[in-house]
Amino acid sequence: MQKKIFAMALAAGLAAATADAADLGGKVLKVGSDTTYPPMETIDEATGQVVGFDVDVMNAICERINCKAEFVTTAWDGIFAALQQGAFDMVVSGVSITDERDKIVDFSDPYIIVSQAVLMRVADKGLTIDDYKKGKKLAAQTGTTNSQLAEELVGKENTSLFDTFGAAVEALRNGDVGGVIIDGTSASAYEQQYAGELVVGISGLQSDPLGLVFQEGDKLRDAFNEGLKMIQDDGTLDKLKAKYWAPAS
C-alpha cells in the first residue's frame, strides 16, 4: 500500500512539474547566427540548411519548451546591434559570455566551455606564441574574444583580422598568415577538414563559456534556461557534445 501511495505521489509530482514547465506555444523564433563557424553552425552545401552543434542544441531545447528555431544567417559584425533592433528573437552563434557584452544583451546559463587554440600549417607545427610575437601573423575574426586574445598575446601589429573565420583559414592555407587563433572546438573541425594540411598546434589557451543571447530583459531567457537544464539533466547535451567531439567535453 505504501509503495502504491509513493508511486501515486511521484506521478503527481511529475505531472505538476510538467504542467509548470515553460511552454512557448509552438512559437517560431528567428535566431541570428554567423553560419560560417563549423562545427557550431554552418550551411550544408547539399541541402542549403543551417546545421551544427548550436542548431542541435536549439532544436533539443525547443522540443522541451515547445518552440521552433529558424536560423537567420547574419554577419558577425553588427549581430548584437541587429538583435537589439529586433531583427531576430535571439542570437546563437558560439557566443562567448563576457562582461562587456553582458552590458548590452542578456545571456543564458553557459551550455559549453571552450578553450582557445592556434590553428597552423602542418609544416609549422611546433611554433610557439613567442614565434608569433617575432613577426609571424596571427589571424582571427573581427570582434571576437579570439581577436582580443590575439592582440593581448602577440600585439596588434602581429594580428590580422578577417570578417569570417573561413576567410582567416583561407589566408592561413595561402600562407598569408602564420596561424589562426580560434575556439578549440572549431580548430579541430578545420583540422579534420584539411587533414594533412592544417593542425591544432597550440591548445589550452583562454577558456570561454558560451551562452545563448537575448535582448535585455527578455523573458525568453528564463524559458531557455529551463530547457537547457532539462537537456543537461537527461543527458541530451552530453550526447550532442559526443556527436561532435569525442569524448564528450
Image: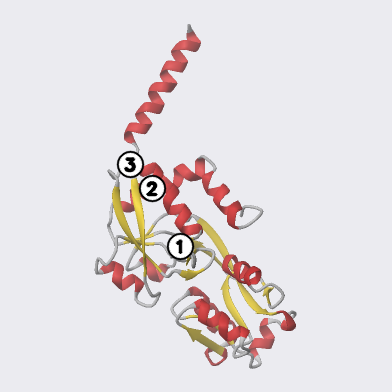
Which residue, given by chain and number where applicable, does mark 3 sit on? 22
| Nearer to us in this view, 188 or 112 | 188
In the rendered structure, the answer to whether residue 18 lies left or right of residue 125 reads left
Give the Cα separation between the discs numbered 3 and 1.
32 Å
Q: Earlier in the sequence, mark 3 or mark 1?
A: 3
- Mark in front: 1 vs 2: 1
Question: 179 above or below 10?
Answer: below
The percent position of residue 204, horizontal first and vertical second, equals 64, 68
Give the Cα separation between the discs numbered 1 and 2.
22 Å
| Nearer to us in this view, 175 or 99 | 175
What amino acid type should be assigned to the residue bearing mark 3? Ala
**Which residue shows up at 44% across the image and 67% down it?**
98
Alpha-carbon neighbours of circle 3 within 10 Å: few (<14), some, or many (≥20)? some
Question: SS for tag 2?
Answer: helix
Which residue, given by chain and number where applicable, does mark 1 sit on? 47
In the rendered structure, the answer to whether residue 137 lies left or right of residue 23 reads right
What amino acid type should be assigned to the residue bearing mark 2? Cys
Q: Earlier in the sequence, mark 3 or mark 2?
A: 3
Residue 204 shows in the view: no
Quarter of the image that includes the C terminus: bottom right
Question: SS for tag 3?
Answer: loop
Identify the residue at the far front of this view: 46
Alpha-carbon neighbours of circle 2 within 10 Å: few (<14), some, or many (≥20)? many
The percent position of residue 89, horizontal first and vertical second, equals 29, 60
The percent position of residue 224, horizontal first and vertical second, equals 37, 50
The percent position of residue 166, horizontal first and vertical second, equals 52, 77
Query: Label for residue 62?
Result: 2
Residue 202 shows in the view: yes
Q: Earlier in the sequence, mark 1 or mark 2?
A: 1
What amino acid type should be assigned to the residue bearing mark 1? Thr
